[in-house]
Amino acid sequence: MIEKLYNWMMQQAASKNAVRVLIFVSFIESSFFPLPPDPVLAIVVAKNRHKAMYYAAICAIASVLGGFLGYYIGYAFFELIGSKILVFYGQMDKFESVVTTLNEWAFWIICAKGLTPIPYKIVTIACGFAKIDLLTFGIASLITRSARFMLLSFVCKKFGEQFLNFIEKHKTATLVLIVLTVIIGFLLVKLFI
C-alpha cells in the first residue's frame, strides 16, 4: 500500500493533473480531510522546481478557500457536520474554551495554528462557530497558509534533487514520517487546543 501511495504521488507530480490534485487536497484538508497537502506539494515542487512559488501560491489559495468552507461548516452546519468533525478529532470537550480564546485572540491564533501540524480544519470550524470577522479570518489564513507553503516550497526547490533521492531510497521511511506528522498533529490538538 505504501508503495502504491508513493507511486501515485510521483505520477501525479509529473502529470498534467498535478495542479488539480494539489488544489483538491489543499481545499479539502482545510475543512474536513485528515491528511495535509504538504507531501503532494513537496513532491510536485521537487519535480518542478522552476514553478515552486507558483505551486505554493496555488496551494495557499486553495487552502484558504477550503478554510472558508470549514468556516461555513462551523457557522451554518455545526450541529449537523462540524460537531461530528470535532468528535472525530477528539475536540468536543475543549471546544468551548477554544471559542472563548478565539473571541479574544482570533488573528494570532489563526496565524499560529495555520503554521503547525495541528489540523487547520479545527480552527476554521471553530472560527465559523464563533462568528469571527470574515476579513480577519481571511487575512490571517492567507498570511499563515502562504508562509507555510512558501517555506516548504523554498526548501523543496533548494534541496529538490536530494529530497527526491532520499524519497527514492527510503520510500517506506518517508511515508511513515508523513503518517507520524499527522499523528503528532492529532496529539497536539488533544493536548493544546
Image (spheres, rainbow, N blue to C red):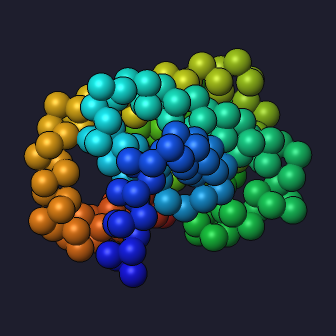
Which residue is at a point 19% across and 51% down the rendered structure image?
164
Q: Quadrant of the N terminus?
A: bottom left
Q: Quadrant of residue 182?
A: bottom left
In the image, is residue 43 above or below residue 172? Answer: above
Q: Quadrant of residue 124?
A: top right
Judge by depth and name the residue closer to the eye, 18 or 105. 18
- Counting the numbered discs, the total is 0
Which residue is at a point 74% across and 24% down the rendered structure image?
134
| Image coords of residue 187 (percent x, y) | 41, 65
Residue 55 left/right relative to 48 = right
| Image coords of residue 41 (percent x, y) | 40, 43
Residue 13 left/right relative to 106 = left
Which residue is at a point 32% across and 36% down the rendered structure image?
48
Asked whether the viewer can see residue 49, the reply is yes
| Image coords of residue 90 (percent x, y) | 59, 69
| Image coords of residue 17 (percent x, y) | 53, 47
In the image, is residue 130 above or below residue 92? Answer: above
Q: Quadrant of residue 146?
A: top left
Judge by depth and name the residue closer to the eye, 33 or 123. 33
Judge by depth and name the residue closer to the eye, 123 or 105. 123
Asked whether the viewer can see residue 22, the reply is no
